Amino acid sequence: MPTLYVASDTPRAGKTALSATLAQRLRQDGRRVAVFKPFYSPANDGDSDPDAAILAAAAGASAPGATWPTVVSDGAEPDVARAMSAYAEATAGADAAVVEGLSGLDGAAGEASARLASEMDASVIVVIAYRDGLGLDEARAARQLFGERLAGVVVNGVTRYKSREVGGQLAPRIESQNVKVLAAIPEDRRLLGVTAGQIADHLGGRFLDWEEKRDNFVERYIIGGMVLDWGVLYFQQFDNKAVIVRGNRPDLQMAALRTPTACIVLTGGHPPIQYVSYEAGEEEVPLIQVDTDTLETAAALESLQERTQFDHPMKHEQFRELMSRHADWDALLGAVTG
């Protein structure tokens, strides 16, 4: 059975997005595709792995298998033998398999990745997170670690002003090392989006109404402060936004409600006036109340993006669109199907 093992040079490089997108594409092509993730390092004891559910959904399953992924504590040696047993169970009867592997190209993680790819007889794609000064070291490390199994690399999160440099200079230099660049995916704000519910949970906020809209997608935050223009003109600049505004500013709240808004975060512990509550109910916009002031609330949201997952249909759609424009699909699918 053809198997693709997706590794990365660093955590949060984009393994889940690539693995899920490839699995979904294989399903659309009529293949019975299995997905698998051997290991998971939780941030807190007892945490479940959201990526496993995302992968399972991409393969058409309601939930990941009971035997994967295996929790690995920081510094512990990955149990490759146990992972291989779970892999055999998870992929039984499939036409192809996509495996979201480990992050890291050296040390214990690199050794475990190389062994897993060998025992699975898998082709390998390595996702490299773009950063300033990115050179050939990661591509060389991937080639050294996986050898002829390496189908190529995907450079993910290329900043807008570096796309020409990556396409015209870095990619040819990588390919001169006998490593194919399968895609150079630009960074995209939508992939860093969150939901109204994640905002409320992160801030310790309370839904005043429309909690059933907690999956509303948020790409941007807009602060409702000293707005000199007509409020509607200010807020209508963006859709898919969360408006952060003092709870005792009904003028700004009403202006926001006249534009497409995912949620309104009311700061300072102030409840909304009845007219705002009524209008929010009519527009089906969740109101979230927090005790912190506007500046504290905005500052607290900075750390939320560090925890974002590939967990919303709008993100899936956006990544597929980016792949369609910036990836060598034939080569990517060829790495899975042979």
Image (cartoon, rainbow, N blue to C red):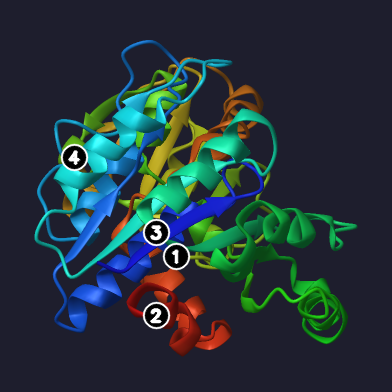
- Provide the residue designation for mark 4: 210
Location of residue 328 in the rendering, given as x and y in whole percent from the top left corner: 53, 86
Residue 144 percent across, percent down from the top left: 72, 56
- Residue 95 drawn above or below residue 71: below
Q: Are dots 2 and 3 in contact, CB under 8 Å?
A: no
What distance separates the C-alpha of mark 4 from that of mark 3? Answer: 50 Å
In this rendering, the label closer to the viewer, 3 or 1: 3
- Graded by Cα atoms within 10 Å as few (under 14), some (14 to 19) or many (20 or more), the crowding at tag 3 reads some
Residue 204 rendering spot, x and y as whole percentages: 40, 18
State the CA–CA distance, disc 1 to disc 2. 34 Å
Taking the image as drawn, is residue 27 in sight? yes
Packing grade of label 2 (10 A; few <14, some 14-19, many >=20) is some
Q: Which residue is mark 1?
A: 239
Nearer the observer: mark 1 or 2; the answer is 2
Q: Which mark is residue 121?
A: 3
* Residue at which label 2 appears: 333
Q: Nearer the viewer, mark 4 or mark 3?
A: 3
Q: Secondary structure at mark 4?
A: loop
**Sequence-first disc among 2 and 3:** 3
Q: Amino acid at mark 1?
A: Asp
Judging depth in this view, the residue of 210 and 118 nearest the camera is: 118
Q: Amino acid at mark 4?
A: Trp
Q: CA distance from mark 4 to mark 2?
A: 42 Å
As shown in the figure, which amino acid type bears the numbered disc 2? Leu
Helix, strand, or loop for circle 1? loop
Looking at the image, tell me whether mark 1 or mark 2 is earlier in sequence order: 1
Q: Are marks 1 and 2 in contact (CB under 8 Å)?
A: no
Residue 197 visible in this rendered orientation of the protein: no
Q: Nearer the viewer, residue 169 or 251?
A: 169
